[in-house]
Image (spheres, helix red, strand yellow):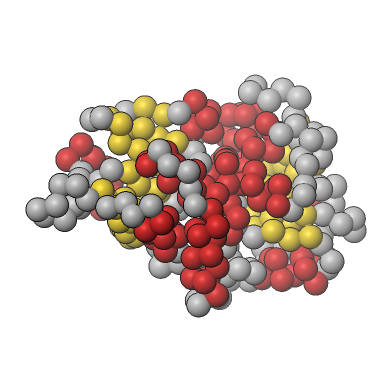
Amino acid sequence: MRAAGDPELKVYGIFGWPLGHTVSPVFQNRAFDYYHLKSIYFAFERPPSRFRFLMRHLKSFMLDGFNVTVPYKETVIAYLDRLSPEARIIGSVNTVKKEGNRWAGYNTDLHGFLAGLREAKFRASGKSGMVLGAGGSARTVVYALAKSGARDIVIANRTLSRARRLVNRFQRQFPKTALRATFLRGKEFERAISEVDILVNATKVGLKPSDGSLLQKKLFPKKKILVYDLIYRPRRTKLLQLAKQCGYKIQNGETMLLHQGAKAFEMWTGKRAPLREMKEALHVALKSQ
């Protein structure tokens, strides 16, 4: 994956399936251009079987680093030589760096998610949260909220066993935060959502134009809460549109995307991310789509 005859060129990219929505190459390449680096970033859309094949041959890659997104944030771990402490605890990796002949996994989604909370002026300490989903992104969100001092967190998922696994994973790590699992429907779910201060969508529902809202208007709590959707394209999912209509504060995944990518850039290059330029490139890309 390196241009023939140009050993100085550094190649980076992102793996995911599907990947048509990604704008990561736009702002990462803008950052490389800002420093006049001989580097390039590609989108590598690969189905699961092909991704696993490539990861088994990771040692022969001519890549210098890469990102992973849905559905590979957990899958990639088995193929790496080491994990950062946070990535190990969370059990999710979105940034991979080549360190000598070894591949190391990091979780820069955590940095990005917390940046989104700061932008929304939301402090999780002492608050109640609900996370929709139980995949790699949900793991990051639960960890971030618990580490920030959330009083309690409900993990709602269509497969209850997956949500319970997250509870078991983090409850011992964060004994002061009450964690529980529930189905993404039913009376227990409705009671839980009525008490939250922050609701986070960490599922893929909302990526497709045909996707509806995960929640009906009647399910939103009466008090004003923050509704945070990790999806950034479309910039307003149907969930966020509905939340806005109900008068709630909303936050999409754009800030998270920017800051996780900036952190990855800094890990790969050792240079400070040009946030202003990266943000500008991201905004232009999202507006044009």
**Rendered residue at 85%/47% (across/down):** 195
The spot of residue 246 in percent (x, y) is 83, 68
Near-viewer residue (117 or 186): 117
- Above or below residue 171? Residue 233 is below
Near-viewer residue (62 or 50): 62
- Above or below residue 128? Residue 210 is below
The spot of residue 239 in percent (x, y) is 69, 66
Q: Give the quarter of the image for residue 134.
A: top right
Q: Does residue 74 appear in this view?
A: no
Which residue is situated farthest in the right direction here? 222
Q: Give the quarter of the image for residue 209.
A: bottom right
The total of numbered circles placed on residues is 0
**Rendered residue at 30%/31% (across/down):** 99
- Please state if 72 lies on the left or on the right of 133 as rendered: left
Q: Does residue 289 appear in this view?
A: yes
**Rendered residue at 9%/53% (across/down):** 5
- Please state if 4 lies on the left or on the right of 285 as rendered: left
Which residue is situated farthest in the left direction here? 5
- Please state if 92 lies on the left or on the right of 66 as rendered: right
**Rendered residue at 45%/60% (across/down):** 27
Near-viewer residue (266 or 187): 266
The spot of residue 96 in percent (x, y) is 37, 40
The spot of residue 206 in percent (x, y) is 58, 66
